[in-house]
Image (cartoon, grey):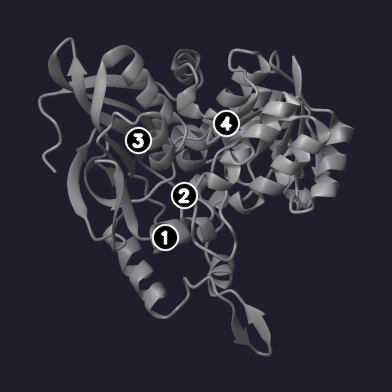
Amino acid sequence: MSRVLVIGAGGVSSVAVHKMAMNSDIFSHITLASRTRAKCEAIADSVRQRTGVTIETAQIDADDVAATTALIRAVKPLLVVNLALPYQDLSIMDACLAAGAHYLDTANYEPRDQAKFEYSWQWAYQDRFRDAGLMALLGSGFDPGVTSVFTSYTRKHLLDRIDTLDILDCNGGDTGLAFATNFNPEINLREVTAPSRHWQDGQWIEGPALSNRQLFDFDQVGPKNMYLMYHEELESLAKFYPEIRRIRFWMTFGDSYLKHLEVLQNVGLTRIDPVMFEGREIIPLQFLQALLPEPASLGPLTRGKTNIGTIATGVKDGQVKTLYVNNVCDHEAAYAETGNQAISYTTGVPAMIGASLILTGQWQGAGVFNMEQLDPDPFMDMLNRHGLPWQVRELDSPLAF
């Protein structure tokens, strides 16, 4: 039984805290903090109604290292679960080091003024966490997170060598709205509009955003257009599995989403540099975020399923094989359980699982770790027991594209 501090009060945090409360034998005391305490109180009310568990709440500006350090010292958690914005990763890591707490997040750091996300900033904390005897676990969401664990599980049990790896992320959900992002709009649009990038033969290959499209038939969702993108787990997988010759990430988008995105880009609303408006500076993308639906509000509207997984081609016992490991998650079932749609669910549940493995000592170490560095078996077991069951299927041949 352990104390945990969760920072951030969006949909992912709501799912993670609900699932923590459902596992009170591991999470004996939960404190939820964010910039807006009212959001924490709303989640706490839902947790109490659904599980009977009472959690504490607090107000914190996670950009303020001193204030965050003071909160950690007051709460005395064994682990801080960072479910705030990626901009705040480094300040929360600094606070964990100052206060002596383990650290976990679901997305890697990126600076506010540059749409660039990479692990270098957080990997630079390796010596500090190691010397402090603390563990920092990066990317314990779905992608990154579960997809990284799918890869390490494939390498441990299914293939002797992985030659090519494709990560396929399909959201077959429909909100009925003309345009909405399924997680934080600012982070989502920065990610989608970035140039595509994949790993091949020891180097990064770049191309225009959303320029490479392929059709794939997703189980329980159907045929969907998916687009080659850059995603952060490509960087860590290339580092820790140098044998893999090609690593790619694909995500599905509907025609309506892409049409709206094109218009928003054309009129400059996805820009992250400041512009003058009525005598003051504003960031167009942040203004756009204020106009778009709050992702946490999409739960009761979303119908359909997600299908996210990895397709690895390699060698087992001298034979070339292609293995598909994936999870299908139902938006309505996720909402019924936690009050949140499946995108939040598929990230919040792995955050809870990663936290539980640290708290129970099944995952431990001093330093900064990515998911694929750790034993996949206890994580894969918990996915099956906590709402994200997975399956393995052997494909007849490698992907044709």
Q: Residue 103, can we see it?
A: no
Tag of residue 351:
4
Residue type at the position of mark 3: Ile
Task: Please tell me which of labels 3 and 1 falls first in the chain.
Answer: 1
Q: Nearer the viewer, residue 103 or 118?
A: 118
What is the secondary structure assignment of the residue under circle 1? loop
What is the secondary structure assignment of the residue under circle 2? helix
Measure how far apart labels 2 and 4 are at the Cα level.
24 Å
Measure how far apart labels 2 and 3 are at the Cα level.
21 Å
What is the secondary structure assignment of the residue under circle 4? helix
> Which one is in front in this view, the residue at disc 2 or the one at disc 3?
3
Q: Mark 4–mark 1 contact, CB under 8 Å?
A: no
Task: Please tell me which of labels 2 and 4 falls first in the chain.
Answer: 2
- State the residue position of label 1: 177
Residue 228: percent from the left, percent from the top? 28, 51
- State the residue position of label 3: 308
**Label 1: few (<14), some or many (≥20) within 10 Å?**
few
Q: Mark 2–mark 1 contact, CB under 8 Å?
A: yes
**Label 3: few (<14), some or many (≥20) within 10 Å?**
many
Q: In this view, does 62 lie to the left or right of 205?
A: right
